[in-house]
Image: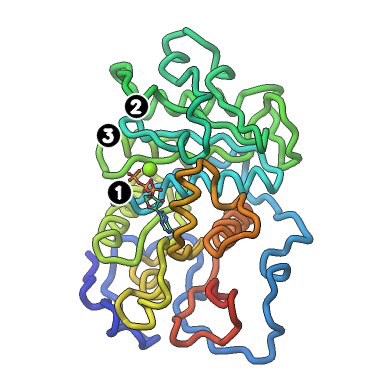
Amino acid sequence: MLSLHHHLPGTTTNANLQFPPTTHLRHSTPFPKTLTLIPPKPHLPPLTPKALLQWNRKPQLSGETPRVVVVTSGKGGVGKTTTTANIGLSLARLGFSVVAIDADVGLRNLDLLLGLENRVNYTVVEVLNGECRLDQALVRDKRWSNFELLCISKPRSKLPIGFGGKALTWLVEALKARGDGTSGNGNGSTGSRSPDFILIDCPAGIDAGFITAITPANEAVLITTPDITALRDADRVTGLLECDGIRDIKMIVNRVRTDMIKGEDMMSVLDVQEMLGLPLLGAIPEDSEVIRSTNRGYPLVLNKPPTLAGLAFEQAAWRLVEQDSMQAVMVEEEPKRGFFSFFGG
Ligand SMILES: Nc1ncnc2c1ncn2[C@@H]1O[C@H](COP(=O)(O)OP(=O)(O)OP(=O)(O)O)[C@@H](O)[C@H]1O
Ligand SMILES: [Mg+2]
């Protein structure tokens, strides 16, 4: 069990913190590089957006495709749907074919964030009832035709009795078997083919909806905010994911505020990472543009010029593709690299 009060802001500026043993520090993913503070490296050239995002190359898709990734958190409202939309579109923009499944059955809203709500004519319910084909329930994004959305049900319709992990696994298998059955491996072409990524937007909590959403997944992106309630839930969810055989778990720390971290009113990303013991996929700053883009149905990563949070989501997408992770830095210890220093090493 985590002893969260040992890690409240103001008590964690020492790199040699002792952490109580947790149930999930047994990850197969190597992690030690994130456990030490990164000393400033004055010899490094200043980071530019180009160097940081490596626009000049395409990320190397790592692992077997389709990669079935559940985006989960435990606590509600921490940014799962925002992350699914932004990482999903980033992946599509990088040329990978993506299917995003909104598994938040009762309170679906991924369609709203993507601006696709008026185009959802069929859902999985109709597919399972034999009223339409799976292809008809997939809503193709107009901006990026290699991105498709699949909703489980219409907002007020009832789910078929017995809809659960097995049904979702059947859907994922059907998606894998689409078209000629070969993965696109990031060539970005449209048409029916097995996707490179299947992202599952998980509902909050750890009840039946959560179990359903994680069943077909073989990796997870755990979203948390830097507060003790979200962390406790994230810790619990990590244990449940591991019990379900999902060992590849990476985390995103969302709604980070450097001003509050500096004022010791918020845990740093490094504190969060040390507590959860998970590789870090990204740190997303609090950004009012997120709310604006949500209301416009236009995910942040499509904004021009890009915002801090949009860039952070794009970087997280890169790391997801390459199964990479980032190093967290303590704000207090950060080398002064200007605007982009937020993102760490
Ligand atoms: N980095 C951020 N900066 C500012 N606002 C954010 C950020 N991330 C998410 N939000 C806002 O937080 C709210 C909740 O986000 P979102 O719906 O993605 O969370 P969720 O985890 O999917 O919620 P639920 O558990 O209800 O499904 C939204 O209003 C969103 O705009
Ligand atoms: Mg959601």
Gap in angstroms between the C-alphas marked 2 and 1: 20 Å
Q: Nearer the viewer, mark 2 or mark 1?
A: 1
Reading the image, the residue beneath label 3 is 208
Gap in angstroms between the C-alphas marked 3 and 1: 15 Å
Q: Is mark 1 within 8 Å of ligand 1?
A: yes
Gap in angstroms between the C-alphas marked 3 and 2: 8 Å
Secondary structure under the numbered disc 2 in the rendered image: loop
How busy is the neighbourhood of tag 1: few (under 14 within 10 Å), some, or many (20 plus)?
A: some
Q: Are marks 3 and 2 in contact (CB under 8 Å)?
A: yes
Secondary structure under the numbered disc 1 in the rendered image: loop
Reading the image, the residue beneath label 1 is 76
Question: Which one is earlier in the sequence, the residue at label 2 or at label 1?
Answer: 1
Amino acid at the residue labelled 2:
Gly
* Quarter of the rendering containing residue 78: bottom left
Q: Is residue 284 left or right of residue 175?
A: left
Question: Which one is earlier in the sequence, the residue at label 3 or at label 1?
Answer: 1
Residue 26, horizontal then vertical, whole percent? 38, 62
Residue 45, above or below 3: below
* Residue drawn at (67%, 77%) of the image: 47
Reading the image, the residue beneath label 2 is 164
